[in-house]
Image (spheres, helix red, strand yellow):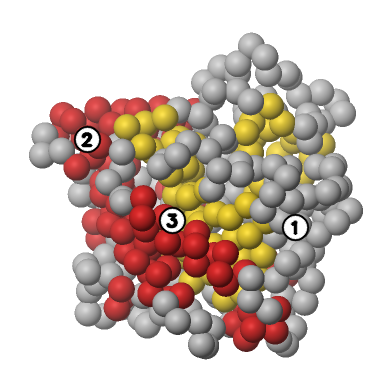
Amino acid sequence: MAPSATETTPTSTAKTVTLQNEKVFSFNSNQSTELDIIPVIDASRIWSDKLEDRKAVADEIRTASREIGFFYLINHGVDEKYAEGALGQAKRFFALPEEKKMEVFTGLVPNEYVGYHPMKCYNRNGWKHQDLSEAFNWAYDPKEDPEAVKDCEPSASIWPSDVPGFREGLYAYHTELLRLARQLTRIFALALHLPEHSFDEYIRKPEAGMRILHYPEQSHSADDQNGIGAHTDVECFTMVTQDSAGGLEVLSKSGTWVKAKPIPGSLVVNIADCFMRQTNDFFVSTVHRVINKSGRERYSAPFFFGFDRNKLLEPVATCVSGTNPMKYPVMTGGEYYAWRTNKQKSTNNRNVHGSA
């Protein structure tokens, strides 16, 4: 997609950052702007009995995933009460005393990203101040999946004691998003001009983690601190529930930060690195960050959907050819997830591998 006329071209003074997927990107300034470059897609037809309806949505998703890697999903079929419940649980958890949250510190679980990630634990971009956010992550649990197969491994998640209803409230939303993610994966297959059920074997035992986040209002400028620094996501795609505070920003092709303004009832969907690898860069995994300058606290709940850890990350047939050869080495999803998790826990981070 051609940049909007109000965007600028990267200059020799552009800032350069190396991501944890080892790609390098540049941007002009830490200032952000409001441009309507993120499309809004009505998802109601993904549930239609008519293939032509589902293909029509797939065509819109193909364009968005190719050109910007982000889109809003509206009329997606998930009751808003589940999102409200999850954000309510986030407020409840992050209000707990620090020592209570540290009972489930992520450093207690090697090679996994589950548990509590303390405030100012990370500094993704090496700015002057640590990233101003805290998070709690949990993983796919076959016991909470109505479509679970028998040989699934147990969940690696850890949960705080004596917080009644916390786990149940979060998995209630997780289960609804899991149902949506599986259907959306079939729409992605159509978007790639593949048979609709091409990825079904990859999502019987999905990598389907989720997290809740809390961002205090930032007093430092975007030049000195992020809520979460510029990054790309790991799995195939992410569905983000955000409150009305705003703060999510997407890097445009021209190197300008664009605000992903909250749309009530929507999910913000973005392509992640595994899907970029499997589509041989046809889909784009776009750099994004959070800067909370709203004057109040921000809460969000991203759902990360990926394929079975035991399946190979190799390009799909429609995205590789003699003139467009494979760009990435083949590895299993599990190998890639572990590599990225270890990099995230070890790069510019405070005490992530220490004891609680």
Residue at image x 78%, y 50%?
A: 218
Q: Is residue 281 above or below residue 104?
A: above
User: Is residue 241 visible in the rendered structure shown here?
Assistant: yes
Q: Is residue 35 above or below residue 267?
A: above
Pointer 1 local density, CA inside 10 Å: few below 14, some 14–19, many at least 20: many
Q: Where on the picture, by quarter, is residue 50?
A: top left
Q: Amino acid at mark 2?
A: Arg
Element assignment for label 2: helix
For discs 2 and 3, the disc positioned in front in the rendered view: 3
Residue at numbered disc 3: 84
Residue at numbered disc 1: 132
Q: Is residue 259 above or below residue 270?
A: above
Specify which label sits upstream in the sequence, 3 or 1.
3
Mark 2–mark 3 distance (CA, rounded to whole Å): 24 Å
The answer to whether 100 appears left or right of 130 in the picture is left
Residue at image x 71%, y 56%?
A: 216
Mark 3–mark 1 distance (CA, rounded to whole Å): 23 Å
